[in-house]
Image (cartoon, helix red, strand yellow):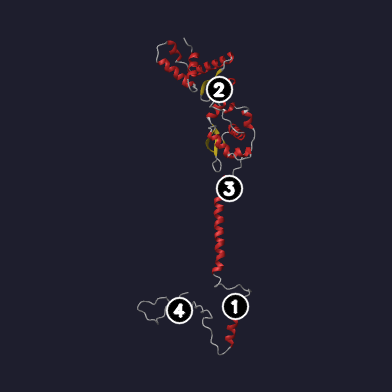
Amino acid sequence: MLTLKQAIEALVFASPKPLTLEEICKALRGAAAETEDLNIIAMGEATEEQVASELNLLRAEYEQTGRSFQIVEQVNGWAIATVAAAGDWVRQLYPESRPTRLSGPALETLAIIAYRQPVTRADIEAVRGVAVDGVMQVLLDRALVKIAGRADLPGRPLLYETTEYFLQHFGIKDVVELPNSDELRRVNLPKAEYPEEGAAAEKPEKKGRKKKAAAEGADAAAAPAEGAGTEAAPAGAEAPASEAAVPAAESAAAESPAAEPAENTEPAPAPDPTSDAAVAEPTPPEGGAGGVEAPPATE
């Protein structure tokens, strides 16, 4: 007759993947529902706390007896695996499976993410002092790092954190089990400088003002060129030689009694605002004569 500990050991050993406490209890209850054996029915009433206690007893027994395999708790459940010392022999059974190795820069970047996650790429580059675009792509392709969302910072940069496969690969349940986790998390590391939200919002407005000012300056520069032939020269400015000859010719014609005055040389006199013509209607009244005077303007 098997005990609860042996039944749990059989389940973990036969499973192709790690088993959680919930999955082990579900298997025990399923076996109890399909039999009339009182012993199996009693095992089906085991709680997750009892199952965890039995698993810890199994782990202690394996260590005390010096077995070449062990029962370990991984991030996704419990599993039986060979000890690390037996790796040289076990590796001969899988010659095509070679361990994946990371470069030094990739390991440094992965360590920064593991100890400071979630972290932005700019903060990683601030610590390492170099760009990490290629290294980040390698870590993403190998499923050691994933995108965890966006930071509440200007530009909304991406956040990166380790994956469940990372924990499985290094044989830990949580990142707090990393060496010197508490100490390294308290170390002050360089941080990337992000522009303030107000300054970031003002940039488009300033850019628009600069474009507007440049356009106004271009219009102002083009205005004198367009009206150069109509505007009078400022007082005290010397006129060009071609323009200076015109007043001289006009004065000579005025001194000669036989010369006729030039046409359209003087502007027409401005109308008197008090005269009848200034206040007359532009269109004569219907049926009226051309000589009818308009009523005087009232002051």
Extreme residue toward the top, this view: 1
> To which residue does mark 3 refer?
199
How far apart are the two marked residues, 2 and 1, measured between alpha carbons? 105 Å
> To which residue does mark 2 refer?
92
Q: Secondary structure at mark 2?
A: helix
Tag 1: amino acid: Ser
Res. 277 mark: 4
How far apart are the two marked residues, 4 and 1, measured between alpha carbons? 40 Å
Q: Answer few, some or many: residues within 10 Å of disc 1's Cα (few below 14, many 20 plus, some between 14 and 19).
A: few
Q: Answer few, some or many: residues within 10 Å of disc 3's Cα (few below 14, many 20 plus, some between 14 and 19).
A: few
In the rendered image, residue 229, in percent from the top left (x then y), is placed at: 55, 72
Q: Nearer the viewer, mark 4 or mark 1?
A: 1
Q: Answer few, some or many: residues within 10 Å of disc 4's Cα (few below 14, many 20 plus, some between 14 and 19).
A: few
Q: Answer few, some or many: residues within 10 Å of disc 2's Cα (few below 14, many 20 plus, some between 14 and 19).
A: few
Asked if the residues shown at circle 2 and circle 1 are in contact, with their CB atoms under 8 angstroms apart, the answer is no
Q: Nearer the viewer, residue 13 or 225?
A: 13
Tag 4: amino acid: Ala
The numbered mark, 4 or 3, whose residue comes first in the sequence reads 3
The numbered mark, 4 or 1, whose residue comes first in the sequence reads 1
Identified at 55% across, 37% down, the residue is 137
